Image (tube, grey):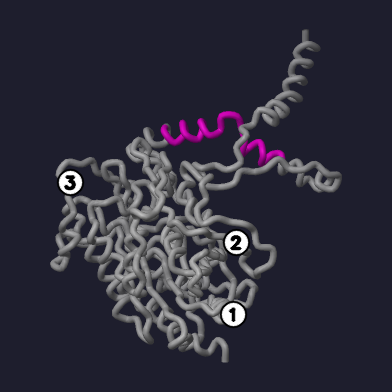
Amino acid sequence: MKIKIYIILLLFIISSPLFLLFTTENIYVSQTERRELAKLPKLTFSSYLSGSWSNGIDKYIDDHFPFRQNIIYIASIIRHNMGFQIKDRERILYIPRLKGNANYPDDLDSASKINYLTDFNEAMAGNLLVLNGCIYTLNSGSPTVAPAFSKMLSDYALQFEGKVRVFSCVAPLSSAFIPVERYARYNGENKKTLDAIRDNLTNGAIFCDVLGELNKHPNEKLFFGSDHHWTALGAYYAYISFCEAAGFEAIPLESMTYKYKYPFLGTLYEQTRDKTVRDNPDTMKYYMPDVFTVAERYNAYNYNAPCHSEVFCEHFSGGGSYSTFLCGDAPLIKITTDTRNGKKAVVIKNSMGNAFSVYLISHYEEIFVLDFRYSKHNLIDLIEKNNINDIIFALGMYGAVNHGTINMMKQMAFNRGKMPEIITLPDTVAPDIIVDSIPPEEFINEEINTDSLSETIN
């Protein structure tokens, strides 16, 4: 009898790993977690001896456990019902609330046209406002830090004075469009930060009034309810503000092909796992200009071994739907179009700039899209060698009111294809910002010791 039990136990021990290995889910990208899952490692003599093969098998089984996606979903429901929230699941958000009385701002003319709700369910999830199944940030930028962003742009404008135009195209935060009267103040507070950017630009740097254009459409879906990014429609209105500043004629939405993706539960849902948000997922409608494009992605340091990319990546869905724009973030993307006008642009962006950049293909023959968080390419060399006409800083406000991220954009003038020195973060970082998925090692944390970027090529 004991021998039978031992045999059964031995068979169970042997068969369990094989069962897990051959019944794992055949999924290679987790849309919920927005990451690639571990791949089955290749067995070689050296990998077996080093232990890397067995470690890879462990990671593969962890990421492909049978019914893993269902278990994650059920676990989120249990946490929600027990009152547990994921704390700092992804290092995306730091959102202290705006202090003070939330009354109407005196100068809030266009935004006062918002159809404010009179019947709504409201709750707080940490520092986020959950309202009728939509999540809003409760912060508004920093007018005191904004001039540092303006100076950085103005230094680039001075560097290329008379040769290259420099544009500020900064997105406001979703707090500007909360459809409840007592939060109306946040629109005006967003405006103060953006006005501080505008008022401190010099050397011919050009301001795009993104919020002013968005305020003309306050009752349209400008930001996702489950994600911190703006919608394709919100990005389109930002594109209109850019065209007005650049002297271009904006391409009407009616002339573009549009498609839908549903359901979409984004970063803020991942932050809160709120049931009301899960029950009201976003629909992502996106617009595609009728322009032929070829896109390539480059690594952070050089132009070697480019890989094929797309302006619109159709295979993304679910929680990764926002990566439809430019196939997500990359250090450098080059887009070549059949808009044969000889014009070239560089877009400096964080992820908010992805949905914006796709509209520019109607106006430029070549577009270089640099993510300041990851790229180590020298911006000045790129501009001079490629005869760039326009530099467009298209990013979310949270990147424009943080000394660390401002220094990243400034550092791009000094990069020489190698990792810059990492310095400690200053104490002057604005207290009311969103930090957009910046790895700790990516911070450039000290004011660069130059009065002007003009010194960079002397």
Q: Secondary structure at mark 1?
A: helix
Q: Secondary structure at mark 2?
A: strand
Q: Which kind of residue does numbered mark 1 sit on?
A: Lys
Label 3 sits on residue: 117
- How crowded pointer 2 is (Cα within 10 Å; few <14, some 14-19, many 20+) is rated as some
Q: Which kind of residue does numbered mark 2 sit on?
A: Glu
Label 2 sits on residue: 296
Label 1 sits on residue: 385
Determine the residue located farthest toward the bottom in the rendered image.
Answer: 458
Q: Quadrant of residue 183?
A: bottom left
Q: Position of residue 25 (x, y in %)?
A: 61, 32
Residue under the point 45% across and 56% down: 290
Q: Is residue 299 left or right of residue 401?
A: right
Determine the residue located farthest toward the top in the rendered image.
Answer: 1
Residue under the point 62% across and 64% down: 298
Q: Quadrant of residue 6?
A: top right
Q: CA distance from mark 3 to mark 1?
A: 53 Å
The residue range painted magenta reads 57-77
Q: Considering depth in this image, is 44 or 325 the residue closer to the camera?
A: 325
Q: Which kind of residue does numbered mark 3 sit on?
A: Leu
- How crowded pointer 3 is (Cα within 10 Å; few <14, some 14-19, many 20+) is rated as few
- How crowded pointer 1 is (Cα within 10 Å; few <14, some 14-19, many 20+) is rated as few
CB under 8 Å between discs 2 and 3: no
CB under 8 Å between discs 1 and 2: no
